[in-house]
Image (tube, grey):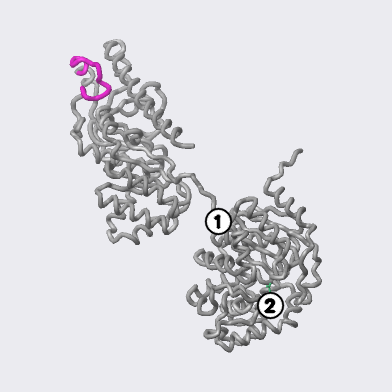
């Protein structure tokens, strides 16, 4: 059997093979236990934002997370305290000092950022906890949300740093002196040592990165690890301060937020796309893993991932756009009305939009809509294929709808239930609750189109009266003489239906053809109200001709949508006409065929709009 290898997997393996021979750098030894690490270990893992893992080399070898813990604990402290409070405890400026520098702002005593030890210890102190154990347990639990499994502290590395970490203890006391730490520093520094000694492997790091790339939700478990609003804060400090005193060079070359640790790990995040974890213990003079740096540089260069040069995505968020002249609703109308809709329907326009709506994708839609809105009586924005709408997009759309309303263009947002935040966001922009109600009035585009067509017809000289007694105007009677119409009229029975009443039930035997004299009837697959309403018929049309022609049982329910009056034509009477009045029979048969042909033509036109505009 041939195993097809993903080119992504092959590329990571080729990088692993290429850089395995690099032996520059030294294993960090200032924490004695770290010095024992095998310097040749080398692992790579890339986790996509939808949770797929590519791995090469020692990607499951455990090592201690060290400084890579810092942005994640910062995220936890942000979730606990909010941004405003955290900015009083640590700044967000690159310091230009070594990671373990005893440098605090001269006046405030505030550390420069949460990625240097001073800022990280201050941050650990802000994790809500009532004891050392509680603090460590909460940190471990937070890491577990990112990795999807329980986490533990490596006791040997923790012990080693705890015995030798006097410098960090000094920083802790300095922070206490400036009231940046508001509790006894020893226990907080102890918690910091434990957080640095949490055991991870490259797959953990990659998934932690993928979770940040996925707006804070672990893509494998679906568990939220951090509030989505804090993801950008965490990634920002990683981007500006994450790679020690090489942070500027890193963002210049690689262009992704990242964090490294002295044990040889690097975690980089491509927001919205993936996380990558690389481990190789030899670090350079800045404290960054030499091989990990090379891997990340190559990945960024080969796949063109620099964040400040994002790919232009030409895919339009406009999926389809058509007017009712090109594609009318599924309302079956009298031929005269249908002609009117065709002639004037360009004043009703539908925009089917798709994908993730953010500023750029929404701006192009807004531009399209505004450009044509001068001639438009109504505009329908169909959200059926939209996956997400962010706050900026919702505001733009709300402003667009308000502008259209001001211009007197009836505007409808349809198929919105899968975007629950859209309506409240629009409502937050508008003071007029009734206008919001109007905007979201129609669940489906088809219902909105029907309303817009009816509304348009109101403005035109009526081609058919709203109540039709004269058989001559019906499509079934086309080509019949007055005498023949008289014969037909004698065969018809009048019947009234109240709103909601069944006219036809699915699976019934087909005994009659229905001529709609007044009102509108709806055709439902499934139960009326809950199933899907596939068409409706208004005055002057005939319903039920399919089963009338081929004798099959009824395939759908037909229900009165208001007070409806129909004339019923019994199938046996129709068949008897073949003997008694063959010309009437033949003419009606022809009219039935014309009616079916008209419907088929509409379907063909709809399909051609879909296939020419798509792809
Ligand atoms: N636990 C280490 C320290 O505080 C972490 C250093 C690092 O990875 O940058 O010294």
Q: CA distance from mark 1 to mark 2?
A: 31 Å
- Residue 480 in magenta stretch: yes
The answer to whether residue 15 is seen in the rendering is: yes
The magenta segment: 471-485
Most extreme residue toward the bottom is 177
Taking the image in four quarters, ligand 1 sits in the one at bottom right
Q: Is residue 231 left or right of residue 25?
A: left
Q: Main secondary structure of the magenta part?
A: helix
Q: Is residue 541 left or right of residue 21?
A: left
The disc label shown at residue 193, or none:
2
Q: Is the shortest distance between ligand 1 and the CB of mark 2 under 8 Å?
A: yes
In the image shown, does 60 or 419 lie closer to the viewer?
60
Question: Which residue is drawn at the image coordinates 61% and 76% (left, top)?
Answer: 120
| x and y, in percent, of residue 506 in the image | 40, 33
Q: Read off the residue under disc 1.
A: 272
In the image shown, does 30 or 563 lie closer to the viewer?
30
First in sequence, mark 1 or 2: give its number: 2
Q: Is residue 109 above or below residue 374?
A: below
Question: Which residue is drawn at the image coordinates 64% and 53% (left, top)?
Answer: 301
Determine crowd level at label 1: few under 14, some 14-19, many 20+ residues with C-alpha closer than 10 A.
Answer: some
- Residue 62 in magenta stretch: no
| x and y, in percent, of residue 97 in the image | 63, 76
| x and y, in percent, of residue 542 in the image | 30, 27
| x and y, in percent, of residue 186 in the image | 65, 85
Q: Is residue 388 above or below residue 478?
A: below
Secondary structure of the residue carrying numbered label 2: helix
Secondary structure of the residue carrying numbered label 1: loop
Residue 524, quarter of picture: top left
């Amino acid at each position: 059997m041939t195993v097809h290898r993903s080119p992504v997997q092959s590329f990571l393996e080729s990088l692993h093979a290429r850089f395995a021979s690099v032996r520059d750098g030294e294993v960090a030894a200032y924490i004695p236990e770290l010095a024992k690490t095998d310097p040749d270990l080398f692992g790579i893992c890339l986790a996509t934002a939808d949770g797929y893992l590519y791995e090469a080399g020692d990607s499951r070898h455990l090592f201690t997370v060290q400084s890579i813990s810092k942005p994640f604990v910062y995220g936890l402290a942000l979730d606990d305290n909010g941004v405003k409070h955290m900015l009083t405890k640590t700044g967000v400026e690159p310091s230009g000092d070594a990671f373990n520098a005893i440098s605090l702002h001269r006046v405030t005593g505030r550390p420069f950022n949460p990625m240097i030890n001073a800022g990280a210890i201050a941050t650990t102190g802000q994790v809500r906890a009532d004891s050392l154990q509680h603090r460590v347990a909460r940190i471990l639990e937070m890491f577990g949300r990112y990795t999807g499994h329980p986490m533990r502290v490596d006791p040997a590395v923790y012990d080693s740093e705890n015995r030798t970490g006097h410098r960090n203890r000094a920083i802790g006391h300095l922070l206490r002196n400036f009231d940046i730490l508001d509790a006894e520093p020893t226990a907080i520094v102890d918690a910091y040592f434990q957080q640095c000694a949490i055991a991870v492997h490259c797959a953990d790091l990659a998934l932690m990165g993928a979770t940040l790339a996925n707006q804070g939700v672990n893509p494998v478990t679906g568990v939220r690890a951090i509030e989505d609003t804090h993801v950008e804060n965490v990634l920002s400090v990683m981007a500006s301060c994450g790679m020690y005193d090489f942070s500027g060079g890193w963002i210049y070359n690689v262009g992704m937020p990242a964090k490294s640790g002295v044990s040889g790990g690097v975690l980089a995040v491509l927001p919205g796309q993936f996380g990558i974890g690389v481990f190789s213990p030899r670090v350079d003079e800045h404290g960054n893993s030499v091989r990990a740096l090379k891997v990340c540089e190559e990945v960024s260069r080969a796949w063109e991932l620099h964040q400040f040069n994002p790919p232009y995505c030409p895919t339009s968020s406009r999926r389809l756009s058509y007017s009712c002249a090109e594609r009318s609703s599924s309302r079956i109308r009298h031929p005269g009305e249908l002609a009117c809709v065709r002639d004037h329907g360009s004043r009703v326009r539908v925009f089917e939009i798709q994908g993730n709506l953010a500023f750029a994708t929404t701006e192009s839609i807004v531009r399209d809509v505004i450009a044509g809105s001068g001639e438009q009586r109504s505009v329908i924005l169909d959200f059926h294929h939209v996956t997400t709408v962010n706050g900026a997009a919702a505001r733009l759309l709300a402003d667009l709808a308000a502008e259209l309303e001001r211009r007197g263009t009836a505007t409808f947002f349809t198929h919105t239930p899968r975007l629950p935040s859209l309506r409240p966001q629009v409502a937050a922009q508008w003071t007029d609750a009734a206008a919001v109600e109007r905007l979201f009035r129609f669940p489906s585009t088809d219902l909105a189109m029907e309303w817009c067509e009816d509304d348009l017809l109101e403005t035109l000289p009526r081609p058919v009266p709203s109540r039709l007694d004269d058989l001559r105007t019906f499509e079934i009677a086309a080509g019949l003489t007055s005498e023949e119409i008289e014969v037909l009229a004698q065969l018809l029975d009048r019947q009234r239906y109240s709103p909601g009443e069944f006219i036809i039930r699915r699976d019934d035997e087909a005994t009659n053809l229905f001529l709609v004299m007044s009102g509108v009837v709806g055709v439902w697959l499934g139960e009326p109200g809950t199933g899907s309403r596939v068409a409706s018929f208004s005055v002057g049309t005939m319903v039920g001709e399919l089963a009338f022609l081929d004798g099959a049982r009824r395939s759908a329910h037909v229900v009165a949508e208001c007070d409806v009056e129909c004339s019923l034509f019994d199938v046996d009477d129709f068949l008897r006409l073949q003997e008694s009045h063959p010309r009437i029979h033949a003419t009606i048969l022809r009219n039935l065929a014309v009616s079916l042909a008209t419907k088929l033509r509409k379907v063909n036109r709809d399909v051609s709009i879909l296939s020419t505009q798509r792809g």
